[in-house]
Amino acid sequence: MQSLVMLQSKEKQRYLPMKKGCDCSMAKALFTPLTIKNVTLKNRIVMSPMCMYSCFDEDGKVTDFHLTHYTSRAVGQVGLVIVEATAVTKQGRISVHDLGIWSDEHIDGLKKLVELNHAYGSKIGIQLGHAGRKADIPEAIIAPSAIAFPGMKTPEAMTVEAIHDVVDAFRQAARRAKWAGFDIVEIHAAHGYLINQFLSPLTNQRDDDYGGDRDRRYRLLSEVIEAVKTEFDGPLFVRISANDYIEGGNTPEDYVYYAKKMKSQGVDLIDCSSGAVVPASIDAFPGYQVPYADKIRNEAGIMTGAVGLILNAVQAEEILKNGRADVVLLARELLRDPYWPYRAAKELRTTIEAPVQYKRGWDA
Ligand SMILES: Cc1cc2nc3c(=O)[nH]c(=O)nc-3n(C[C@H](O)[C@H](O)[C@H](O)COP(=O)(O)O)c2cc1C
């Protein structure tokens, strides 16, 4: 494949001599492969999980929309696609239109999704989630404590038996994810959903072994990690909300503590988001969550993913080259442009492979 530099006219090249000591061909961190356990990502660009609310039959099954939507990003050369929050129980859906993995009947559709993404060169992971008190469904909902999220219905405080059932649902979901062929599993412990509700003192007011101090609040996540590991031996990510942004809530320091625990349990990468456990005012600006990925990576000694208003390749390259994260996750930018990695390569003055069918687009 021709390099973009070569696409410039000879004339232009003459007037743009390379400065001595400046090597434009120097490896770009964004396009450097990353191997985690048995899986190699061809670059550091990850499609962040995004609910598409597109199971219109309310059965949680993969539709043609999902096949097209995710596979487009694989064609677009994303290194890793992470499928949206997928419910481990029916009661754990964020909405009735969520994807599900609560029954073996979900495996076939998910398998097809995996195979298509693999065919176009992307690795694919799945985010396993339970919405807890943020489930917007007709049935009763559950949470660590009977405290409603503002504007939503009041959940039932979970019995210990109900907690064990949820842990087992994550285990079963991991078994199905493995059967479907996913390369990576991500546990959703962020954005105020069930596991986050246990981690945060703002939503967990239990006085048993699952509430109280940090270790007890961490217990559900710890058990979910162990349960997932019994079925899935590939790379394991956990998405966290590294800051509750409210007095008395979890802080980035708390998450360094949790991250060390996750590391000791064999978690491979922590995907660092923030907020949404309770309503809070958040000053969101480009890269505003990168300091969390940086802090956790460098204080807990574990790989991290940076996410949140990462908009262009130079910004992404800076994050990676300065050792602030190991991968970058993009959400809305990949909704706007499923082929963002090509644009990023152009911005960084490098080239990337495209499916052979598109080669003509690169020919002079
Ligand atoms: C439509 C939409 C759906 C989302 N669904 C999820 C989800 O299923 N799981 C999750 O962890 N985050 C979800 N998010 C958050 C994104 O993954 C991401 O963290 C956030 O949008 C910030 O990244 P961005 O600035 O690149 O969009 C969603 C965001 C959007 C816009």
Image (spheres, helix red, strand yellow):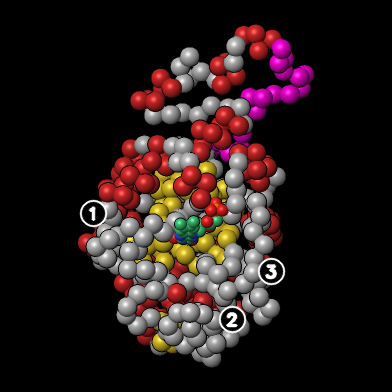
Please tell me how crowded label 2 is: few (under 14), some (14-19), or many (20+) other residues with Cα within 10 Å.
Answer: some
Q: Residue at x 35, y 25 (%)?
A: 357
Kindly identify which numbered label has been placed on residue 252: none
Point out the frontmost of discs 1 and 2: 2
Where is residue 239? Give x, y as percent: 52, 62
Q: Residue at x 33, y 57 (%)?
A: 54
Q: Amino acid at mark 1?
A: Asp
Kindly identify which numbered label has been placed on residue 202: 2
Q: Is residue 175 left or right of residue 36?
A: left
Quadrant of the image occupied by residue 49:
bottom left
Q: Name the element at disc 1.
A: helix
Q: Residue at x 46, y 47 (%)?
A: 335
Kindly identify which numbered label has been placed on residue 108: 1
Marked residue nearer the N-terminal end (3 or 1)? 1
Q: How many numbered markers are drawn? A: 3
Magenta residues (range): 15-33
